[in-house]
């Protein structure tokens, strides 16, 4: 949601509220030449997860990566905070 700043309640348990940030423009590396990654930070515990991907991946592929890599281990968050990156639009 855009507009005025809004208060975000402190989460009561881990992985209830997460922040997501896309890091792109990296030099391709690794066996599969990944050139971007998604940083996901839990606001309660401050723990984090990285999900590597190709910048050229379709939005659905990125969503499936999140679904397959984060949801099984951390659960479904109640709140997701983005940084306004074009990848969120």
Image (cartoon, rainbow, N blue to C red):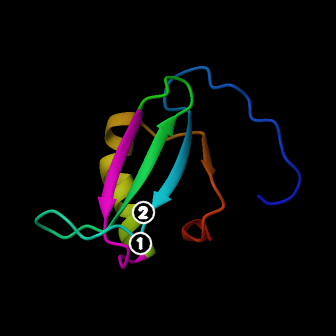
Taking the spot 39% from the left edge, 66% from the top edge, the residue there is: 62
Please check the rendered image and state whether residue 50 is part of the magenta-colored stretch, yes or no. Answer: yes
Q: Residues within 10 Å of mark 1 (few under 14, many from 20)?
A: few
On screen, 31 above or below 6? below
The x, y position of residue 83, in whole percent, is: 63, 55
Residue assigned mark 2: 63
Quadrant (top left/top right/bottom left/bottom right) for the C terminus: bottom right
Write down the region rendered in magenta: 48-58
The x, y position of residue 5, in whole percent, is: 85, 47
Horizontal side of 30 relative to 14 (left or right) equals: left
Distance from the alpha carbon under mark 2 to that under mark 1: 5 Å
On screen, 49 above or below 30? above
Q: In the structure shown, which secondary structural element does the residue marked by tag 1 occupy?
A: helix
Please check the rendered image and state whether residue 20 is part of the magenta-colored stretch, yes or no. Answer: no
Taking the spot 61% from the left edge, 20% from the top edge, the residue there is: 12
Q: Quadrant of residue 44?
A: top right
Q: Quadrant of residue 61?
A: bottom left
Q: Residues within 10 Å of mark 2 (few under 14, many from 20)?
A: few
Front in this rendered view, residue 36 or 74 = 36
């Amino acid at each position: 949601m855009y507009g005025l700043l809004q208060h975000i309640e402190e989460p009561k348990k881990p992985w209830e509220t997460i922040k997501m940030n896309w890091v792109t423009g990296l030099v391709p590396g690794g066996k599969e030449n990944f050139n971007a990654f998604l940083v996901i930070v839990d606001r309660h515990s401050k723990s984090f997860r990285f999900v590597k991907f190709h910048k050229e991946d379709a939005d659905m592929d990125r969503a499936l990566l999140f679904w397959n890599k984060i949801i099984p281990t951390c659960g479904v968050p109640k709140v997701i905070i983005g940084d306004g990156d074009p990848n969120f639009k």
